[in-house]
Image (tube, rainbow, N blue to C red):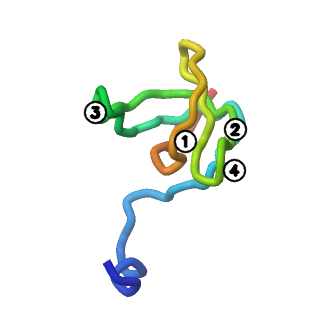
Amino acid sequence: MNLHNILNTDFDRLVLAPEDFPKNALIRVATFDHEQGEVSFKARVVGPSSASHLRIRTDDGLVFAVPAGDCDLIEGDA
């Protein structure tokens, strides 16, 4: 895909940088796992892990990093 096509493409969602996710925000992670294939789950943001990844905490307490591009903020988190 050349630059002209990229600039004229309608993207279906806005991808946030790791630092744009507030600490403790509830997010939906939709990613690929080599053993399970496509997976989707909710988690809480711990903070940025790198320039491209977020450190997250799942409901069972597991903390790990995922690509920020695989994460969406869940609106109306109470």
Determine the image quadrant of residue 1: bottom left
Check contact, mark 3 vs mark 4: CB within 8 A.
no
| Residue under the image location 69 percent in, 50 percent down | 19
| Residue under the image location 66 percent in, 42 percent down | 49
Of badges 3 and 2, the one in the foreground is: 3
| Residue under the image location 69 percent in, 38 percent down | 47
Residue pushed farthest front? Answer: 34
Of badges 3 and 4, the one in the foreground is: 3
Q: CA distance from mark 3 to mark 4?
A: 27 Å
For label 1, the crowd category at 10 Å Cα-Cα, with few meaning under 14, some 14 to 19 and many 20 or more, is some
Q: Secondary structure at mark 3?
A: strand
Closer to the N terminus: mark 1 or mark 4?
4
User: Amino acid type of disc 3?
Assistant: Gly
Q: CA distance from mark 1 to mark 3?
A: 22 Å
Position of 78 relative to 69 (above/below): above
Residue 19's disc number = 4
Closer to the N terminus: mark 4 or mark 2?
4
* Residue on which disc 2 sits: 47
Closer to the N terminus: mark 3 or mark 2?
3
User: Amino acid type of disc 1?
Assistant: Leu
Quadrant containing the C terminus is top right
Check contact, mark 4 vs mark 2: CB within 8 A.
no
* Residue on which disc 1 sits: 73
Q: Secondary structure at mark 2?
A: strand
Q: Nearer the viewer, residue 72 or 51?
A: 51
Check contact, mark 3 vs mark 2: CB within 8 A.
no
* Residue on which disc 3 sits: 37
Determine the image quadrant of residue 39: top left
Q: CA distance from mark 2 to mark 1?
A: 13 Å
